[in-house]
Amino acid sequence: MTFKREPQVFGASITEVEFGTEGASVVFGGANTLPLYNFDAQAKHRALVGIEISDKGPDRSLPELSAFYSGAESLSDIASRACTAPGADFVSLVLESADPNGDNATSEDAAALAKEVAVALAAGGKPVVIQGTGNVDKDQELIPKVAEALQGMNVLLLSAKEENYKGIAVAAVTAYGQKIGAESSVDINLAKQLNVLIAQMGIKPGSYVMNLGAAAAGYGFEYISSTIERVKLAALSQNDDALQMPSITSVAEDAWAVKEAVVSEDDFPEWGPREERGIEMEISTAAAALAAGTDAVILRHPASVKTIADMVAALA
Amino acid sequence: MALKGIDIFKLTPKTNCKDCGQPTCMAFAMKVAQGTVQIEKCPHMSAEALDALGEATAPPMKSFRIGARDEEYALGGETVLFRHDKTFVSKPLFAISTAPDAADTTIAHACKIDYERIGERMCVELIYLEYSGDKAAFAEAAKKVSAAGRTLVLATTDADAAKEALAATSDGKPLLNGANPSNHETFAALALEYGVALGVTADNLDALYDTVREVEKAGVKDIVLDVGAISVKDAFANAVQIRRAALKSGDHSFGYPSIVNVSALAPGDARMQTALASVFILKYGSIIVMDGMSYAQALPLYGLRQNIFTDPQKPMTVEVGIYPINGADENSLCALTVDFALTYFIVSGEIERAGVPVNLLIPDAGGYSVLTAWAAGKLSAGSIAKFIKEEDIESKIKNRNLLIPGKVAVLKGELEESLPGWKIVVAPNEAVSLVKFLKEFKAA
Amino acid sequence: MDKFIIIGERIHCISPVIREALANRDPEPLLARGKEQLDSGATYLDLNIGPAERDGEDIMKWGVKLLQENLDNVPLALDTANRKAIEAGISVYDRTKGKPIVNSADAGDRLDYIDLAAANDAIAIALCSKQGVPRDNDERMQYCQEMLEHAMELGMEPSDLWFDPLTLVIKGMQEKQVEYLQFIRQLSDMGLNSTAGLSNASNGMPKEVRPIVDSVLTAMAIECGLTSAILNPNDKRLMGTIKTAEIIMNRSLYADSYLDI
């Protein structure tokens, strides 16, 4: 007697989204099964793994990270170095300097930095994701400026929120042909609503992705995994086309901000070196987000990028 | 699994004889499905049909325990594939694998991880002892593990080795992991003789399925399914397909907990093992075997497990009390927030980042977030004053600055009335702004 | 729980426009009504060509090809008393978007429509009646069982029979409505699929009350477990009701703009 397999292939699929320029582009989405369920049907594309850099440079107090970026001083050097991280499908630039709660650099200056990085990345053969400041008002001004500066480079701009999606969508997608991420921070109804609103502006599927929120393992991650799972199940099993965009999860910021990745070894000697704690926190969180069904993750440490990329390859 | 009327109808004689008192077999089947009529009311049901019904109404996944005394752990009993449908019930157990001659070192290593997080003990529950050809050494190491207060998994396909180790340790209800298509008869007999759960493995799901059915026939009730270590892809596919067959298709022969040997899937690669263990926490690993467990691995893995296996209806809460942060003492200022674990973690994390010594005060706020607690009457001037009194905070802390969450700024006036001598300070609305706020804060 | 399936009813020979278009093989009216219904949320389109005793086979083939070729292989319910016309329609039917529906079988003279569906791997709408209106739910259940057994003997999956409880007009049979809803619940408890021509209930009522009667009955039937219905997808109130019911039944994720999509 043999075991009766019942492959779960849906009559619906996730929309494909491509970003980057010719020769340096990636595609995600496209599956008609739950993510990583290649035994049900082989997915067209693997989940993507991105490496995050900040316009303020890497944390050089971490020995392994510092060694990876050693000799790379200018932002474009740092970007070029990030391109060489094994397993990285794209590079994600955080425009941290423009944060009004920080250095508050002007949008024009930040956009110029973004341009510098994008040029370096194009040379390095990697597509570009740009993360804003997270500040609604600043991003509303900043992201259109970045979209304009990077015209023709087909970059993915994170993130448009409920408060500023209109301006960002019009400028980034309609005017300059970029891709955008709709950010909804663990609110599944808002995730759908934002997609509906963006679609109603005439933005076509394939031009935007979902950024459903993030949390580190142990810090309310169940909200993240359940949101991702419910969105994927609704997209596929209910054929809900307002949820069929691929999802991207930025793991880096949350993973490196929790206590486990912040406190020093002096204060917690039994916990061991801080860098390894941050790496493992990124790895665990990213692996769990992928298991829940996200289509792309953004990580900061090249060691995390490599492990997660290897895992995605092993499951493909 | 609830049986639909149509499934019962298929088993009826379909003669509409009315002997059951219902007008048609279909009406009868429907009433049975609703539970308003007993299946016995039909005198014409065949024995096979009754058996099939019995099986169909059994729980979809078996639940049992391994280990004994303080080290007894539940496995299985899941009813859903996704935690938003219903709470996952049996959290995955972590095991560290070891050869018999390394048992002492492994036990010492495993016992280093033992801490509490939000009321839950976090430790390496199991030691996965792998047979390496020496029966006496295997049994000896098994005894050491039992003595160390860790539950055993005996990993061997050698019946004699298994017997010797079981004879020495079966009191501790270890898991015997080693039945396969060629040895299942003797292993089933051993599991029954010593009253232990039996792990079954095979090269593919078909062979595993057949072997489980043989072991079931032999009378073994507590079975663990080993998803194998052929490849990461294969192990993941097996874990998902086994659980889906049990919970979605109601296939009882796969309705058992699983064991995933991550240490064999990524030998020597601790980071990859963390990645895979994280995947298997979400997707259907019941026992996860690792090479080792450092704090760097344990902190995210146990945190993730705790998150995924919480009841979606019941928020995680931290204990009521005073939490000194950054070396705070009786002269450090006080800040108050709610007992909802997520809020606590965010607020305490930001205070830590600020580097300013703060006594974080946590009253009983019903496990809600700040605004919800306030709206529900769980965080009021009265409840805060009562907490300050009951916890005797005024004698424990001399500083009289109390920071309250910006979202309940409205409580300031009332609090100043109920807590004479205190300076009530409204902190920012969002925790992220705390770092800047605390650094610039000048106490009164 | 699967989504509620809407079968658009507006390509029906009772409409003079459609009748004329069918007679003259004029594509435009059929395509226009087909598109309108799909845009408003129909999954299936009902193609009712009437009795069509003489040239039914030709008309059905023409209609099936016309609608599927122009409307992205829309799945269809083939609706006529002419059995041969249904067979002809299925012979040119494209299954990419779903099996054809045979509309409809009953437990009496039209029992052999189930044979037709079984032979062609189609879905059959199975009207729970023999002649006229069933006396009570026991009688409905009796017919339901007869058809189900017959289909299973022919090797059909029970899910390919969509049982129609037979919607009764409220003006005249008001006292039968609760029992009708109870029968839908019984079908649902059995795990069977169902469908209904819900607007029959408001037949003979003034134009202005029909929409609310149709909407409320539809909402109540959905709660009882009805899995599909033949209706007018261009009735905005009715579609809003169905979308809302889908939200409340947790089969569609809520978003503030859910009525617009």
Image (spheres, coloured by chain):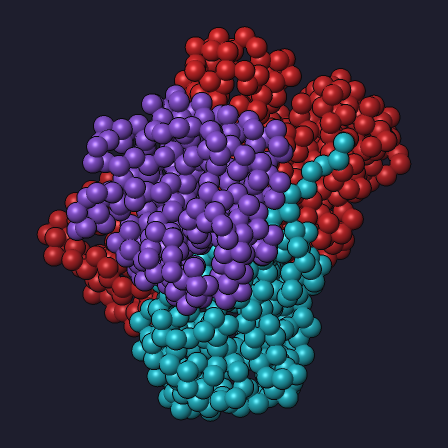
Residue A176 pos. (x, y %):
45, 86
Any part of residue C226 in sight = yes
**Residue drawn 82% across the image and 32% down it:** B181
C204 shown above or below B139: below
The quarter of the picture where residue B224 lies is top right
B359 shown above or below C173: below
Residue A221 pos. (x, y %):
47, 53
**Residue drawn 53% across the image and 38% down it:** C113
C198 shown above or below A225: above
Q: Colour of chain A?
A: cyan
Q: Is residue B267 left or right of residue A96?
A: right
Numbered disc total: 0
C253 shown above or below B47: below
Q: In the rendered image, what is the letter of the chain coloured purple?
A: C
> Residue reaching furthest front?
C54
Q: Nearer the viewer, residue C19 or C72?
A: C19
Q: Colour of chain B?
A: red
**Residue drawn 76% across the image and 47% down it:** B229
Any part of residue A269 in sight = no
Q: Quadrant of the C terminus of chain C?
A: bottom left
Residue B443 pos. (x, y %):
24, 66
The quarter of the picture where residue B191 lies is top right
**Residue drawn 20% across the image and 36% down it:** C171
Q: Quadrant of the N terminus of chain C?
A: top left
Residue A223 pos. (x, y %):
44, 52
Q: Nearer the viewer, residue C145 or A242?
A: C145
